[in-house]
Image (cartoon, grey):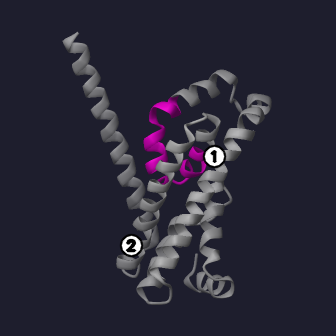
Amino acid sequence: MELTMVSHYINAFGYITIFLILFCGIVGIPAPEESFLIILGMFIAKGQLLLYSSTIYACLGVIVGMLVAYALGRYAGVPFFSKYGKYVGLTEPKLKAAREKFHKHGKWTILFGLFVPGLRQISPYLAGISHYPFLLYVCFSVIGGIVWVLSFLLLGYFVGDQVHISIIVGGAILFFVVYVILQLRKKRSTRFKGSDHS
């Protein structure tokens, strides 16, 4: 996404553009969310956008998108996949297993899944399909959404002009993957210690 294109849309339609682009990206309509946030940070650094307004609209776009996707997953997802899931390999047992797994690891998926393209679009729907507790989902969505938005806005604000966007996005994904691997290893070592004592 080019700076001139972002500037044109924001000048034409105002801060609601920020809300709409991030909302669409979360619900699964293709949108370059990370690069868009980094570009917003660059505009804020240059004084062309207000930090407070940009952050509020960005966070609202993400959180509302996550809530809409959750609702669609909860009220339309189960009947849809029960009827058509077999055609894409999502049988009832697989769907049940996915729900159980999400209830175990849902907190971390909601909090940090936004940092992984693809996962951030799937996890809200999966949370709804799994009937993940709504209040917990809202709480984790708000925290995760604010952290994700601020992370990329601040990256754009401080280093957007010096580092290529693809490097920043790649670094964020790498950081998340390393974090997940370390957590899995930690859980495995805990299990092994528990089995040794038994």
Q: Which residue corresponds to mark 2?
A: 154
- Relative placement, left or right, of 158 versus 6 is left
Q: Quadrant of the C terminus?
A: top left
| Residue appearing at x 44%, y 72% in the figure | 153
| Residue 33 image point, x, y percent | 55, 65
| Residue that carries the numbered disc 1 in the rendered image | 70
Which span is picked out in magenta?
101-124
Question: Magenta stretch containing residue 117, yes or no?
Answer: yes
- Camera sees residue 15: yes
Q: Is residue 71 above or below residue 5?
A: above
The image shows residue 185 at horizontal and vertical percentages of 30, 33
Viewer can see residue 113: no
Position of residue 46 measured from the top left corner of the image (x, y, whole percent): 43, 89
- The quadrant in which residue 143 appears is bottom left
**Magenta highlight: main SS:** helix
The quarter of the picture where residue 172 lies is: bottom left
Identify which residue is drawn at 52% across, 65% down.
Answer: 59
Tell me the quadrant of the picture where the N terminus can be found: bottom right
Q: Could you say whether the residue bearing mark 2 is in a helix, strand or loop?
A: helix
Of residues 14 and 118, the one nearer the viewer is: 14
Disc 1: CA contacts within 10 A as few (<14), some (14-19) or many (>=20):
many
CA separation, marks 1 and 2? Answer: 28 Å
Q: Is residue 185 magenta?
A: no
Q: Is residue 124 above or below residue 196?
A: below
